[in-house]
Amino acid sequence: MKQVSLPEATSYQQMAKTQEEKRSVVTNVLRAFLVGGLISLLGQGLMWMYETFFGFTEKNASNPTVATLVFLSVLLTALGHYDKLGQWAGAGATVPVTGFANTMASTALDFRSEGLVLGVGGNMFKMAGPVIVFGVVSAFIIALIKTIWQLLV
């Protein structure tokens, strides 16, 4: 395998920048706001549906709402539509629960040829591990701060 020298890599990067499509910051922000807002609106609509038609309380309706959003995100990822939405919407498609579900499903699809345990399972947890660890650590720190605050007040 040929080793690429630094000047060749630099000239390649410069050439790639000239070919890259220029995006307007305003357009990116508007697209992200629109798609993120629509995903959130869909979630609110699902929550209302579970409350109205299935008799859930406001507190209990959040669980099936999140499950439905995750299911839809994974389904759209498997069909190849969520990636297109992400390309168009940018950060707006990374609304936490749907973006995370998309990331996990994409990883599972990418590594399925390596087997269920080492391919799908192993790589999904490589992806989810940092999110889970930082989520647990930050929840612990917030709980600790709250406990100390309550003891002081």
Image: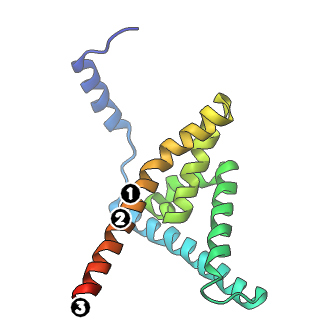
Residue under pointer 2: 138
Q: How many marks?
A: 3
Q: Nearer the viewer, residue 116 or 26?
A: 116
116 above or below 49? above
Q: Nearer the viewer, residue 14 or 142?
A: 142
Around disc 3, counting alpha carbons within 10 Å, would you say few (fewer than 14), some (14 to 19), or many (20 or more)?
few
Residue under pointer 1: 134
Secondary structure under tag 1 reads helix
Corner quadrant of residue 65: bottom right
Q: Nearer the viewer, residue 88 or 22?
A: 88
Residue under pointer 3: 153
Q: Nearer the viewer, residue 136 or 11?
A: 136
Secondary structure under tag 2 reads helix
The Cα–Cα distance between marks 1 and 2, rounded to whole angstroms, is 6 Å
Q: Amino acid at mark 2?
A: Ser
Residue 34 place in picture, x, y as percent? 49, 71
State whether residue 85 appears in this view: no
Q: Amino acid at mark 3?
A: Val
Of the residues under marks 2 and 3, which one precedes in the sequence?
A: 2
The Cα–Cα distance between marks 2 and 3, rounded to whole angstroms, is 22 Å
**Looking at the rendered structure, which numbered label has been put on residue 68?**
none
Q: Image quadrant for the N terminus?
A: top left
Q: Is residue 27 left or right of residue 62?
A: left
Residue 91 place in picture, x, y as percent? 43, 60
State if disc 2 and disc 1 touch (CB < 8 Å): yes
Corner quadrant of residue 25: bottom left
Q: Residue furthest top?
A: 1
Which residue sits at x=60%, y=86%?
59
Residue 67 place in picture, x, y as percent? 66, 67
Q: Is residue 1 left or right of residue 149?
A: right
